């Protein structure tokens, strides 16, 4: 991305605070409804299979919209897309809470998924822009704040459920508050307006610096490994969210109370890893950090598979969570700087690829565990970690020409 003006440090700090608040707000909006899903399931009189099918509406909506997220952000502006999208996201979740039928609930979730795909692209695009202006890595801390926001949103939902707060009232009030915060975050996140968005240069023509841009095939050759790298990172979180409780119950001697803590331990370790991600990225480069992260994912999965007692299994989950922390932020930072694409296109495509992965991961774990056991199926995160490490090594060799003000995407670094 090309940004000709050089804002002051105070301007960059303010913009970073604003985009950080954007990430936090998105996490709160997405998670506040989750603790009340059992109530919704009961109110709509759905069995487990029916409710699971209805919930697929959210990722399907996100998958459909993610392909167009780049066009939307360019058409209306990144910050405007994030601001308006956050307000609409709050409305969609309020409608979901007020739904009186499974069809209406699914429609609201589909709309929420589609809107979130645009908001997700917008906040990551602006995060990369601010990172460029800062001249150092900040993308990991932004994703850490998203995780913190999601945890906070979950606490809001759990608190309201425990006190029998009306579901629709909760989501209307929660949505109104955080929609207002999103508007504030947008105002704070603004940078000088004389930055020009990246335009796609014709194939084979050089950039201003004289570097030849890749062809369309070459651009996809750069994006595809980043998509797979991001899927490897999200796979760990997805498997832990959906299967760790069952794994600890069935495959170990963990009591029920401890089994429920498995996903929390993994997410906490991921949060810590993201807090540490920016300084270690600035020190070692994204390629080395991503490679180490992949190896840690594999190590954690191996520990969980061979652990004879549940405390070691929980340790394995924590190791994998810590290792996964920087993979998705690194992939977004890389996608945002792939040359030859209009601004935001690389990030939008990456988001689409990640959502394809979300639709595949859990069904694969289910099929493998039915055919053998959940312990055998846990080899999937192990393989994902090894693949991520290999992809980081490949990216180090192939992305050296991608501009990166902060330290190189998953690109070569001499630090």
Image (spheres, rainbow, N blue to C red):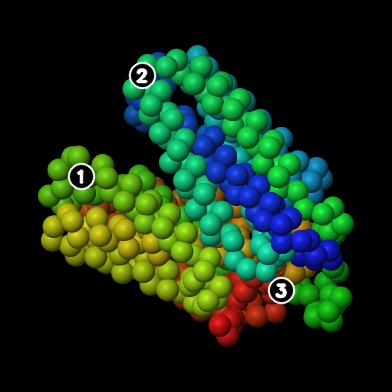
Task: Determine the secondary structure under disc 1.
Answer: helix
The answer to whether residue 379 of the structure is visible from this angle is no
Whether tag 1 and tag 3 are in contact, CB under 8 A, the answer is no
User: In the rendered image, which residue does mark 1 sit on?
Assistant: 258
Relative to the observer, which residue lies in front, 409 or 186? 186
Q: Is residue 222 left or right of residue 372?
A: right
Q: CA distance from mark 3 to mark 2?
A: 52 Å
The answer to whether residue 397 of the structure is visible from this angle is yes
Q: Dot 1, how many residues are within 10 Å of its Cα: few (below 14), some (14-19), or many (20+)?
A: some
User: In the rendered image, which residue does mark 2 sit on?
Assistant: 163
User: In the rendered image, which residue does mark 3 sit on?
Assistant: 403
Residue 283 is situated, as x and y percent measured from the top left of the image, at 53, 76
Quadrant (top left, top right, bottom left, bottom right) of the C terminus:
bottom right
Quadrant (top left, top right, bottom left, bottom right) of the N terminus:
bottom right
| Picture residue at 78% right of the left edge, 61% below the top | 7
Mark earlier in primary sequence (1, 3): 1
In the figure, 294 relative to 138: above or below? Answer: below
């Amino acid at each position: 991305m090309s940004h000709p003006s050089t804002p002051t440090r105070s301007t960059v700090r303010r913009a970073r605070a604003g985009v950080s608040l954007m990430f936090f707000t998105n996490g709160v909006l997405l998670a506040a409804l989750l603790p009340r899903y059992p109530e919704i399931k009961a109110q709509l009189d759905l069995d487990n299979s029916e409710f699971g099918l209805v919930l697929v509406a959210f990722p399907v909506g996100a998958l459909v919209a993610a392909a167009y997220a780049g066009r939307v952000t360019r058409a209306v502006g990144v910050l405007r897309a994030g601001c308006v999208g956050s307000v609409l996201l709050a409305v969609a979740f309020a409608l979901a809470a007020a739904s009186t039928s499974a069809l209406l609930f699914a429609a609201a979730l589909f709309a929420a998924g589609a809107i979130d795909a645009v908001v997700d692209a917008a906040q990551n695009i602006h995060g990369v822009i601010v990172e460029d202006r800062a001249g150092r890595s900040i993308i990991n801390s932004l994703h850490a704040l998203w995780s913190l926001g999601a945890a906070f949103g979950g606490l809001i939902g759990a608190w309201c459920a425990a006190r029998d707060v009306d579901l629709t009232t909760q989501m209307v009030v929660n949505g109104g508050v955080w929609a207002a915060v999103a508007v504030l975050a947008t105002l704070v996140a603004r940078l000088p307006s004389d930055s020009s968005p990246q335009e796609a240069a014709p194939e084979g023509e050089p950039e201003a610096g004289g570097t030849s841009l890749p062809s369309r095939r070459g651009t996809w050759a750069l994006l595809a490994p980043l998509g797979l790298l991001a899927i490897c990172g999200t796979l760990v979180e997805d498997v832990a969210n959906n299967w760790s409780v069952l794994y600890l119950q069935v495959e170990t001697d963990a009591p029920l109370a401890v089994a429920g803590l498995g996903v929390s331990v993994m997410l906490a370790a991921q949060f810590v890893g993201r807090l540490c991600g920016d300084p270690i990225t600035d020190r070692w480069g994204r390629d080395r950090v991503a490679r180490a992260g992949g190896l840690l994912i594999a190590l954690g999965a191996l520990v969980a598979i061979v652990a004879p007692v549940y405390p070691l299994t929980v340790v394995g989950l924590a190791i994998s969570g810590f290792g996964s922390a920087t993979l998705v932020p690194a992939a977004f930072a890389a996608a945002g700087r792939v040359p030859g694409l209009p601004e935001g296109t690389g990030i939008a495509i990456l988001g689409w690829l990640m959502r394809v992965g979300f639709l595949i991961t859990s069904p694969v774990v289910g099929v493998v565990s039915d055919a053998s056991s959940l312990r055998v199926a846990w080899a999937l995160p192990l393989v994902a970690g090894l693949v991520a490490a290999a992809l980081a090594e490949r990216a180090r060799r192939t992305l050296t020409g991608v501009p990166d003000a902060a330290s190189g995407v998953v690109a070569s670094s001499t630090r």
